[in-house]
Every structure is written in structure tokens, then in C-alpha cells.
Image (cartoon, rainbow, N blue to C red):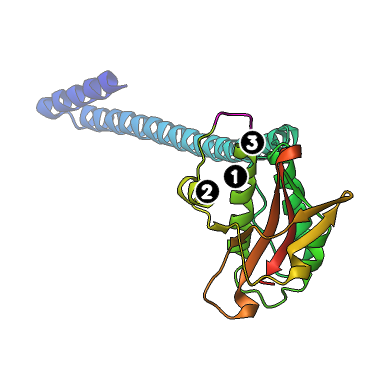
Amino acid sequence: MAGEAHLARERAFEAERSGNLREIVKAVSAERDRALDVAAYNEREWEAAQNAAEEYGKEVIQLQAQLEHLRAQVDALTLSLTFAETDSAPPQDPNFDNAPTDLLVADSQSLNFLCEHLEKAANGHILFTPNVASSWEKAANYPTPSDMQVGLVKLARVAAKIYSGEELVIGHLDTWVRENFDLRISLQDDDMPKKFRTFQFEGTTYDRTPHIKVNDGVPHWACGRVYFTLDSLNSRVIVDHIGLHW
């Protein structure tokens, strides 16, 4: 196409140099025709390129839509897989680290849930009598149930350790418990009423003097106590009161 246009211009120049008007007109007409052909060719090429660009744009839009759809499917499948893995995961055995933390004031249901968990975590070396529920229900204004929960978990740890069968050098139990478990217990209370000092369980009378000092130096309604006994014969700690100071 470019060669033909160049040839047409050469013929036009030759006709102009010859001075023959007819030849000049003929050569110029030929050059014009060649120029029109070039213009038409370029226009077709431009239109073809534009059409190709439009088609390419449509394909890009379609591919983007497909990509978004695939991403949504991947997200949905990932979420389903997460739920499936969660549902299929075996439940954890009760231990001290996963003990329930939602102990509610004066709520025997949440207390029983915690107690059952600790009994299993301690392999039966701690046991809670039915009296703990009634004593906890009376502590309606107790302000720090989270402290009570922490104290009960620590006491269960103590029971599991003491009756684990290991060779232990304990000395003074209250000191050993405080130093090893950061738990304040007392093994005596001279002012404790006589009727409160003992309790019956499974046909046996136990001493209920030992206790955890959950809160101290506070009003009676805020003074938390856990009263228990050390049942060495059966390798267990028996808790009979969870709530307020006697």
C-alpha cells in the first residue's frame, strides 16, 4: 500500500515536469485514489482494533466476575471447613486450665457445673457435697465470684497434688499451700460455732474447720469462705460450704 502511494507521487511529479495537463490530472487523480485507499485501510484497521479492544474489555469484565464468584466460593468453603473441623474436634478432657469461669453469684447451676468439672480434673481427689449449692445460694450480695472461682480451682489443684501418691515434704500445710499454690487457707478457727464445726457425709462425721480465706477484712456480706475437710483415708478433700463466712 505504501509502495503504490509512493509510485503515484512519482508519476505526479513526472507529469508536472512534462507540462502535460492531462497527464498531471491523471497522475493527481491516481495519487488521490491511492490516498483514499490508504485512508480506508487505516480506518478499517482502527475499527478492527477498536472492536478487538471492546471484546477484550468484555472478556476482562467476564473474567473479573468469574474471579469474584470463585473467591466467594472459596470463602464459603473455607468457612464450612472451619465449622466442620470445630464440630469434629474431640471435646477436651476436664482440666484445671479449662475450668468454667462463668460462676454467677447465688447461682447453684453455674456452681454445680464448676464443681463437677473440678472433680473430674482432680481425678476424684476433691468432692463437693450437696450443701455447697445451698450455701452459695445464700450469698446473694457476694461481690467477687471470680475470686471464688479462682480459689476453688486452686483448692482442687492442692487436693490433686496432696493425694497424687507423690513423695511430698509439706511441713505446715497452710504455709506449703500458700507458697506453692498462692492460696490462703486456715486449719483452725477458735471462734467457729460448735454446730458449724462438723458435718455429716456418707455416714461419717467430718471436721469442717479448714477453710479458704477468699476475702478478708471486709463486711460479712462480702467475706467469702470455702469450708472443707481433709479426708486422708479416702485420699480426697471434701468441700461442704461455699459462700460467706459462718
Identify the amino acid type marked 1.
Val
Mark 1 to mark 3 CA distance (whole Å): 44 Å
Task: State if disc 2 and disc 1 touch (CB < 8 Å).
Answer: yes
- Mark before the other along the chain sequence, 2 or 3: 3
Residue in the image at 65% along x and 79% along y: 221
Q: Which residue is mark 3?
A: 78
How many residues crowd around disc 2 within 10 Å: few (fewer than 14), some, or many (20 or more)? some
Q: Which residue is mark 1?
A: 158
**Residue 124 visible, this orientation:** no
25 relative to 111, above or below: above
Q: In the rendered structure, which amino acid carries the disc numbered 2?
A: Val
Q: Nearer the viewer, residue 106 or 80?
A: 106
Judge left or right: residue 40 versus residue 200: left
| Furthest residue in direction bottom, as rendered | 219
Range drawn in magenta: 163-167
Task: Give the labeled residue for mark 2.
Answer: 177
Q: Determine contact: label 2, label 3, CB under 8 Å.
A: no
Horizontal and vertical percent for residue 92? 69, 36
Residue in view at x 10 percent, y 27 percent: 17
Which secondary structure, mark 3?
Answer: helix
Residue occupying image coordinates x 73% and y 64%: 197
Q: Are marks 1 and 3 in contact (CB under 8 Å)?
A: no
The 10 Å Cα crowd at callout 1, few under 14, some 14 to 19, many 20 or more, is many
